[in-house]
Image: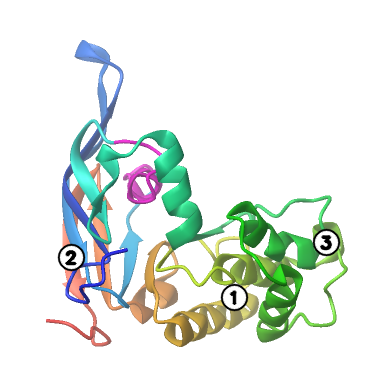
Amino acid sequence: MNSDPTTPAIVAEQLTQRVGAGADALTLLDGIDLALPRGASLAIVGPSGSGKSTLLGLLAGLDLPSSGRVRLDGVDLGTLDEDARAALRASRLGFVFQNFQLVEHLNALDNVRLPLDIRGDRGDTAQAARSMLERVGLGARLRQHPAQLSGGEQQRVALARAFVTRPQLLLADEPTGNLDAVTGHAIIELLFALQREQHGTLVLVTHDTELAARCDAVLELHGGRVRGFHKTENAPWR
């Protein structure tokens, strides 16, 4: 881990992603640049098909770009093999998905405990998971399976799972997309409360204008290119 607090949490330099070849090649992203300070939050917005989820996947190292590079805490993801990128994600990244992505045959406690066990944490991982579920208001629902939980409760489990590892960077793909307005608002409040408590960096994809406005900056994509970037009144950096 880079110990220099001035090192950006994440940097993308001329990030480009193409699929296919020759005349059939399709450009999903074209020359994206961004740098996000530690502890900041960024909303990626734009119409469907603009490249938002593609960009999120590249920032996470789930895919490698056609050209350009991503640096996470100073580490160039392009210099790592697949196993090393997976290890880096396990140690430094958390994920929240629109469809929750909970393991159906595991109860809430075991879903939250799972990333701790995967990265080989020692100690009482069950207690760590229990404490995080209590933090998100599900202390009485530890033994319930996803099918027994409401959509809002499932997203709370997903938040607990993402934050239980105390990630340096949290990536969220439409975290309120499958929730009603009231439940979505509660999840937004919880998401930013947890981010503040853990001093993490947040990058999220969203169509939710309320959620985007809560971030420090907004990056707008259109046709795989940056159409606009602005810092909100919440931005702690200039």
Find residue 223 and report its horizontal and vertical position in percent.
Answer: 25, 42
Give me the disc on residue 62.
none
Please give the range of residues in magenta: 49-64
Q: Residue at x 88, y 69 (%)?
A: 143
- The kind of secondary structure element at disc 2 is strand
Q: How is the image coloured?
A: rainbow
Give me the disc on residue 181.
1
Labelled pair 3, 2 in contact (Cβ < 8 Å): no
Q: What is the CA distance from the residue labelled 3 to the residue labelled 2?
A: 41 Å
Quadrant in the picture for residue 153: bottom right
Q: Earlier in the sequence, mark 2 or mark 1?
A: 1
Does the stretch in magenta take in 131? no
Q: What is the CA distance from the residue labelled 1 to the residue labelled 3?
A: 26 Å
Looking at the picture, which amino acid does disc 3 mark? Asn
Does the stretch in magenta take in 53? yes
Q: Residue at x 18, y 59 (%)?
A: 34
Looking at the picture, which amino acid does disc 1 mark? Ala
- Which corner quadrant holds the C terminus? bottom left
Q: Which residue is mark 3?
A: 107
Q: Earlier in the sequence, mark 3 or mark 2?
A: 3
- The kind of secondary structure element at disc 1 is helix
Q: Which residue is mark 2?
A: 229
Residue nearer the viewer, 133 or 20: 133
Find residue 164 and report its horizontal and vertical position in percent.
Answer: 59, 71
Residue nearer the viewer, 79 or 137: 79
